[in-house]
């Protein structure tokens, strides 16, 4: 099994998280920022048992309880489908030049089939490079929006604490991937996961803050705070730069989907230790089919429902099992002594 | 049935008959009988491969003076123990070794009553003298380059590294050619697993002959379907030494004036020896110019097309007016026009490369002045597009190592940009990035030290620090090794 560096885990998770953040369909007001902070803190607590587990805990679990592996696989397929449905909804915002949404979707799926076939390790190596480009684009976005910021607009927005919190949980699909990635980490998995949670929350708050203060009521009318913000924030006079964010949009989606299909492929390998060429394309096709057959609200609800079970309940039970086994061993060794 | 694997018989007649039979009386095989004392002997050599002067002075003359010898055992032991006829003098016990040595410029002494023969290295074949490499030009470094003779190349490296830590391992590869190949490495710095795997791969090759580095390169590149090289080539001994010092392994091949260096990192395509001679601030500036050139070479025509066709709002109004006016007159669509110009450039480049130098100059004049000027004047090609393509091609010259992938990818990006604008460029860009990230050889990722990120290595990537700081580095490529388990 190929090992992944902690900075690569951080980069791949934050890019996947950033995809969900840029696809937030509607802002719920200033309370959403506090909802995001609360959701982030809850997620940090939920990750504690997962990060306290021993190395290869996930792999061992998959090998002993194959049915659990299937549940995880379904979860990642749902996440992939959710990502695809987000793409389907958000594509018109970016005015993609491909003739029609269908052509754009086909092109993206073809690219993702190729990137997924390169494997999770290639995705991990790619992530820090993509992240550097992403950071530059965020910097340009901030510089462009800076002139339009008006703090008094915060007062105009409504509350939205609970919807904001729910939305943030729905954006955390990639958190399920954190455990599998940590299982393959060389070192520093705790720092990777907590840095990711923190950075994602900061990015989400930044986008919400900029969209509220720079966009004002326009954001509520138009929806999609990130895309509206890119249209509003123009760093150069006489030239529009929003088309450049198409590159960011494409890069983030490819990273997100490659992660989901790569993880699905990885779980398949753990359950059936044969590497098949068709696993990645098959998982991608399943994601597309799921996206078309289940509506986005249901997908969101399913992810919110499964996420705490997969990242908190199961790791917690496993940790308790590990601890009790450790205590038993200790007692046996005392008795033998 | 007699084969090359057969051991030499003790009868001289049978030995010579075997040699003649296996060589099928080849015209370049020379067999000269002579009598040393009471013993019937023969000298076997290949015409044109040995130095006749050395043979006469250092071999035939001393051998003919051994008239007191009566027994072949005593003769061979006397020659081996008391006469230093040549420095390189292996013992031959079968026909395979005999032919390999004869065709490598050795002379073989066979005697009646002996199961073995003595070989003496007196190579004297004509070879090209050491000259400046045609590629990899640099301003301040040495001007000598590798030649076709593997032993000359070994000496060129040894002259720069007078240490027993530098090790050469000679062997042969190619069933028919029996080409001499030489692995060189610094034994205290080379990652042992890298050396082990390279040896294994080379011994597993099943080639008949090795006529260029490209014959062995695919066996050393472990990543299939990659657009980028994970094994580099160099013609310069100074560059080769710098790579060896970083723990890499070099492979010299007889008959090839290039050395293969394993592993290659993508970032090395931007590093030249001159970078380490200039002042650090200037070297860092030049390095960033190279990074930018690579992006220009790859993306400029595609971005130009994408912006003109799909995203004109990215340009200011003056620029849009200039481009609209220029493109209105052109009969072809922008992508077709650009691909046509690039194709013409590749045709001209190939013609200039294959033709004799004197005619090659004429090709440049005809293509540059006549075709280029005529195409623009007649309105077949628009001036802004030609300018963009020319800038892109010139930028590609800055990183010659990446010429092959850039040439192909430039065309693909033009198609993607023309069809789907920045969206297409973004998708193809991601696919290329994944291809680059998936490239590795023997566990060394091509993207290191960018990903996996190594802060310490940034001193020779983002910038170039001075030697006061670099000398304390003790860097080897082993830092980048990614284990599979």
Image: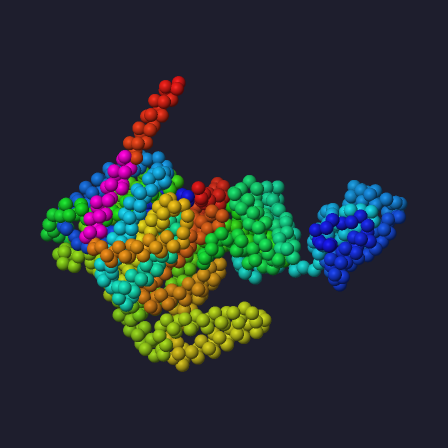
**Which image quadrant: the N terminus of chain A?**
top left
Residue B156 left/right relative to A164:
right
Q: Which residues are magenta?
A: A297-317
> Can residue A305 be found in the magenta stretch?
yes
Q: Residue B438 or A158: which is nearer the viewer?
A: B438
**Which image quadrant: the C terminus of chain A?**
top left
> Can residue B467 be found in the magenta stretch?
no
Secondary structure that dominates the magenta span: helix
Q: Quadrant of residue B214?
A: bottom right
Examine the rendering and report whether any part of residue A101 can be seen. Answer: yes
Q: Quadrant of residue B54?
A: bottom right
Instruction: Give the colouring mode of the picture.
Output: rainbow
The correct choice, above or below, for A60 with respect to B66 in the image is above
Residue A96 left/right relative to A128:
left
Identify the residue shown where x is 30% and y is 35%: A318
Examine the rendering and report whether any part of residue B467 can be seen. Answer: no
Identify the residue shown where x is 63% and y is 49%: B171
Residue B352 left/right relative to B304:
right
Identify the residue shown where x is 65% and y is 55%: B178
Find residue B121 and report its horizontal and vertical position in percent: 73, 51
Find residue B438 and report its horizontal and vertical position in percent: 42, 52
Find residue A209 and report its horizontal and vertical position in percent: 19, 50
Q: How many marks?
A: 0
């Amino acid at each position: 099994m190929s090992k992944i560096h902690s900075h690569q885990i951080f980069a791949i998770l934050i890019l996947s998280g950033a995809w969900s953040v840029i696809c937030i369909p509607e802002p719920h007001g200033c309370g959403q920022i506090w909802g995001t902070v609360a959701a982030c803190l809850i997620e940090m607590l939920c990750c504690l048992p997962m990060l306290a587990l021993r190395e290869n805990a996930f792999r061992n679990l998959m090998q002993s309880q194959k049915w659990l592996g299937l549940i995880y696989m379904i979860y990642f397929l749902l996440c992939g489908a959710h990502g695809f449905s987000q793409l389907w909804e958000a594509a018109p915002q970016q005015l993609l030049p491909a003739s029609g949404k269908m052509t754009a979707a086909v092109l993206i799926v073809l690219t993702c089939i190729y990137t997924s076939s390169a494997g999770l390790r290639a995705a991990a190596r790619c992530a820090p490079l993509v992240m550097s480009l992403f950071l530059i684009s965020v910097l340009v976005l901030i510089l462009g929006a800076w002139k339009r910021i008006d703090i008094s607009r915060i007062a105009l927005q409504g509350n939205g604490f609970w919807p904001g919190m729910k939305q943030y949980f729905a954006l955390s699909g990639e958190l399920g991937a954190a455990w599998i990635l940590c299982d393959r980490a060389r070192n520093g998995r705790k720092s990777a996961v907590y840095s990711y949670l923190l950075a994602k929350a900061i990015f989400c708050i930044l986008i919400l803050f900029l969209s509220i203060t720079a966009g004002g009521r326009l954001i509520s009318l138009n929806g999609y705070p990130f895309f509206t913000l890119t249209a509003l924030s123009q760093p150069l006079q006489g030239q529009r730069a929003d088309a450049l964010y198409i590159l960011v949009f494409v890069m983030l989606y490819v990273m997100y989907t490659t992660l989901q299909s790569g993880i699905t492929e990885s779980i398949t390998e753990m359950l059936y230790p044969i590497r098949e060429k068709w696993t990645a394309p098959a998982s991608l096709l399943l994601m597309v089919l799921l996206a078309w057959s289940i509506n986005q609200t249901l997908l969101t609800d399913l992810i919110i429902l499964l996420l705490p079970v997969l990242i908190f309940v199961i790791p917690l039970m496993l940790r308790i099992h590990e601890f009790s086994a450790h205590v038993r061993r200790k007692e046996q060794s005392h008795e033998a002594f | 049935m007699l084969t090359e694997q057969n051991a030499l018989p003790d009868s001289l007649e049978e030995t010579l008959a075997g040699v003649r039979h296996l060589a099928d009386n080849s015209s370049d095989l020379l067999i000269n009988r002579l009598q040393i004392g009471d013993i019937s002997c023969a000298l076997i050599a290949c015409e044109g491969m040995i130095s006749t002067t050395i043979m006469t002075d250092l071999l035939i003359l001393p051998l003919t003076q051994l008239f007191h010898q009566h027994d072949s055992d005593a003769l061979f032991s006397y020659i081996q123990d008391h006469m230093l006829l040549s420095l390189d003098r292996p013992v031959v016990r079968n026909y395979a070794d005999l032919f390999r040595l004869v065709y490598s410029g050795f002379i073989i002494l066979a005697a009646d009553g002996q199961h073995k023969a003595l070989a003496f290295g007196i190579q004297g074949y004509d070879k090209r003298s050491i000259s400046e490499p045609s590629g990899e030009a640099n301003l301040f470094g040495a001007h000598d380059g590798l030649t076709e003779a593997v032993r000359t190349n070994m000496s060129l490296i040894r002259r720069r590294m007078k240490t027993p830590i530098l090790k050469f391992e000679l062997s042969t590869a190619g069933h028919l050619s029996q080409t001499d190949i030489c692995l060189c490495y610094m034994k205290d710095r080379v990652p042992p697993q890298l050396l082990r795997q390279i040896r294994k791969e080379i011994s597993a090759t099943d080639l008949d002959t090795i006529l260029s580095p490209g014959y062995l390169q695919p066996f050393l590149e472990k990543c299939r379907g990659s657009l980028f090289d994970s094994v580099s080539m160099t013609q310069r001994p100074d560059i080769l030494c710098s790579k060896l010092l970083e723990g890499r392994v070099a492979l010299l091949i007889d008959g090839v004036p290039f050395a293969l260096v394993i592993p290659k990192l993508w970032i090395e395509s931007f590093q030249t020896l001159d970078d380490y001679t200039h002042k650090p601030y200037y070297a860092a500036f030049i390095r960033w110019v190279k990074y930018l050139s690579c992006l220009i070479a790859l993306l400029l025509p595609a971005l130009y097309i994408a912006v003109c066709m799909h995203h004109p709002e990215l340009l200011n109004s003056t620029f849009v007016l200039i481009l609209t006016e220029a493109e209105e007159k052109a009969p072809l669509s922008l992508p077709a026009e650009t691909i046509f110009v690039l194709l013409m450039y590749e045709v001209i480049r190939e013609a200039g490369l294959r033709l004799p130098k004197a005619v090659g100059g004429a090709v440049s004049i005809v293509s540059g002045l006549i075709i280029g000027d005529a195409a623009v004047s007649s309105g077949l090609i628009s001036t802004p597009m030609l300018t963009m393509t020319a800038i892109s091609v010139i930028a590609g010259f800055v990183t010659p190592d990446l010429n092959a992938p850039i040439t192909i990818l430039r065309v693909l990006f033009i198609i993607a940009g023309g069809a789907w604008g920045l969206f297409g460029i973004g998708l193809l860009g991601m696919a290329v990035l994944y291809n680059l990230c998936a490239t590795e050889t023997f566990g060394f990722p091509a993207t290191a030290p960018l990903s996996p990120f190594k802060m310490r290595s940034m001193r020779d990537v983002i910038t170039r620090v001075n030697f006061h700081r670099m000398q304390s580095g003790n860097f080897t490529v082993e830092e980048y090794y990614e284990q599979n388990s």
